[in-house]
Image (cartoon, grey):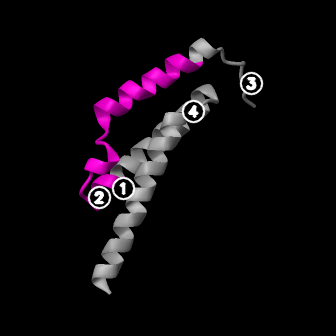
Amino acid sequence: MQYYTIMSDLEKRRIDREFEIFSMRNFEKPKKCKNLDQVRFYLQEVSAKVQEFKSQFNYVPDSAYQLLAQYNALLNSMVLTEFKNTY
């Protein structure tokens, strides 16, 4: 069983900033992605980072969920477009 301490606002801001820097360095903005495989890769990476934050801090920055939602929406749109073009 894991016990979590209550995080201070300062700690949350530090984690938020850490994710912001990580995402700027490691991810293409969703609207710049042109490739379905690229979007899938980024989706996996952001999901892994969210799980890491959950297990390590029991806290996930809102920006991580927002980025995940943006990649997911883009993936769904690309898959729908590909489906329409195929059939």
Can you tell which of label 4 and label 3 is closer to the viewer? 4
User: 63 above or below 83?
Assistant: above
Q: What residue type is disc 3 on?
A: Tyr
Q: Which of marks 1 and 4 is nearer the N terminus?
A: 1
Q: Which residue occupies 44% across, 28% down? A: 19
Q: Is residue 18 magenta?
A: yes
Q: Which residue occupies 31% across, 74% down? A: 82
Question: How would you classify the magenta stretch by its main secondary structure?
Answer: helix
Give the Cα separation between the discs numbered 3 and 1.
33 Å
Give the Cα separation between the discs numbered 2 and 4.
25 Å
Q: Name the residue under label 1.
A: 40
Q: Quadrant of residue 77?
A: bottom left
Q: Which of marks 2 and 3 is nearer the N terminus?
A: 3
Q: What residue type is disc 4 on?
A: Val
Give the Cα separation between the discs numbered 4 and 3.
17 Å
Q: Name the residue under label 3.
A: 3
User: 7 above or below 83?
Assistant: above
Q: Earlier in the sequence, mark 4 or mark 3?
A: 3
What span is in magenta?
12-40
Q: Which residue occupies 29% across, 58% down? A: 37
Give the Cα separation between the discs numbered 1 and 4.
21 Å
Q: What residue type is disc 1 on?
A: Arg
Q: Name the residue under label 2.
A: 37
Q: Name the residue under label 4.
A: 60
Which percent across, then down, holds residue 49?
47, 37
Which percent across, then down, holds residue 20?
41, 27
Q: In which quarter of the image is residue 11?
A: top right
